[in-house]
Structures are given as C-alpha cells and as structure tokens.
Amino acid sequence: MRWSVLLAVWLGAHGAVAAPREDLEAELRTGDIVLHTSRSRQSQFIQVATESPLSHVGMVEVTPEGAWVVEAVQPVQRVRFAKWKARGLKGRILVLRPKELSDAQRQQAVDAAKAHLGKPYDLRFEWGDEAMYCSELVRKAYARGAGVEYGKLERLGSLKVKGLEKPMRERYGRKVPVELELVTPASLAVDARLEVVHSDFPAVR
C-alpha cells in the first residue's frame, strides 16, 4: 500500500488533521514526536524502502527558552525546533503525541533520549547503544523512559528494498544483513497510540 493511502486511512480513523498554523511551536509539548522528509542522501532510499515520505524523526522538549528537538544525526544532538523544521523538505512536518502518558512520563522519555547526546549516528541501523539512528533513539527513549515501545521492529529484508541493492552493498558490503531488525520513521508514524497534532503533508490533510 502506498504511503499516502496508508497514512490517509490511519489519520481518517484517528480524527481530522489540523491545518498548518504559524503558531505551531506554541502548540508543541515535551515528548511530541516530530517527523519530516530529510534532505540527506539516504533519505530517498528510506522513502523507497518504507513507501513513506517520512524519513527522519526526533523528540520535542519545551523549555522556557523555547522548543527544541532531540535527534540522532551526526552526532546525536539537541537543536532549536525552528531550525529542525526548516531542514525538512519544504518545511513540512508531522507532529504526533502519545495519548495516554503523563507530562512526567513524556519528560522522562526525553531525558532518556538526551542521555545519548554526543553519540555517533548509526549508519548500519544496528540495535546497540554505541551509536544511534533517528527512529531507534525515539523508540528506546520511550521504552526506557516511559515503558512504551512505539513503532515496530521489522526485518530489513521485509522492507521494499528491491532496486536498492547498490546503496545497501555500499553500506554493508557484499553480505547485506537482511535479517537485521530495525524500526523506521514510517512505523512510528502509523502507531495508533500516537495522536496527530499537526500535519503539513497534502496527502493527509
């Protein structure tokens, strides 16, 4: 199923999507999960493999100084929300919020994510803690900070990787680990335990 259809069906079942607002930052809450289309080279491969435009994800922390995003790039870092949003293709983002967690639980999840600040980005999408990729950081932060595992683990070989043999060999060598389990931004995006706060994606308005 194409990403646009999948997200449209899911969003239709979870309520209307908010129209874009200039005061979006004021609507954010600590623990919100934000997704966009990265401009990185690997973004196009992630989009193809997951049939989704959502190729990067981070976690919001709201402070008296404004909203920030904790994200796994090179290295894991904490950046201003406005800067994070601007990095996405056309500035479009999807904002999700856990439905049944307290403010304290969401802050604990963000604190768990911040424990990884400074770690390198995991280009191989492995599950160890020595390095982190974006959706791994979010899933682990909520699992360890709030006891909830958002998204699902999927085998690399179960994704739409046909036609991506060359970039995968460049990353992994001749033996691609098709049994590798990973969590994708697209998997987080369709988790029914997360409610839509805002979406800029035309296909799901």
Image: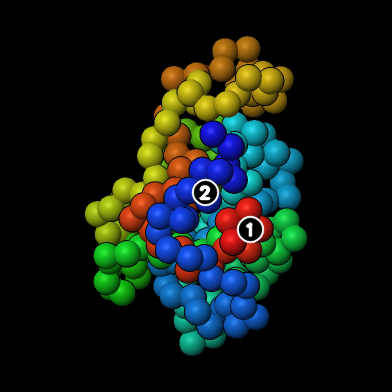
Q: Quadrant of the rendered structure where residue 83 is?
A: bottom right
Looking at the figure, which quarter contains the N terminus?
A: top right
Q: Are marks 1 and 2 in contact (CB under 8 Å)?
A: yes
For mark 1, does the 10 Å Cα neighbourhood hold few (<14), some (14 to 19), or many (20 or more) residues?
many
Q: Where is residue 29 in the image (x, y as percent from the top left)?
A: 44, 75
Label located before the other in sequence (1 or 2): 2
Residue type, label 1: Phe
Relative to 145, is 189 above or below? above
Q: Name the residue under label 1.
A: 201
Q: Residue at x 58, y 37 (%)?
A: 2
Question: Which mark is drawn over residue 7?
Answer: 2
Q: Position of residue 133 (x, y in %)?
A: 52, 44
Q: Quadrant of the rendered structure where residue 155 is?
A: top left
- Left or right of 87: which side holds 148? left
Q: Residue at x 31, y 74 (%)?
A: 103
Viewer-nearest residue: 106 or 196: 196
Question: Which mark is drawn over residue 53?
Answer: none
- Left or right of 116: which side holds 38? right
Q: Is residue 131 visible?
A: no
What coloring was used for the rendering? Answer: rainbow
Residue type, label 2: Leu
Cα–Cα gap, marks 1 and 2: 10 Å
Looking at the figure, which quarter contains the C terminus?
A: bottom right
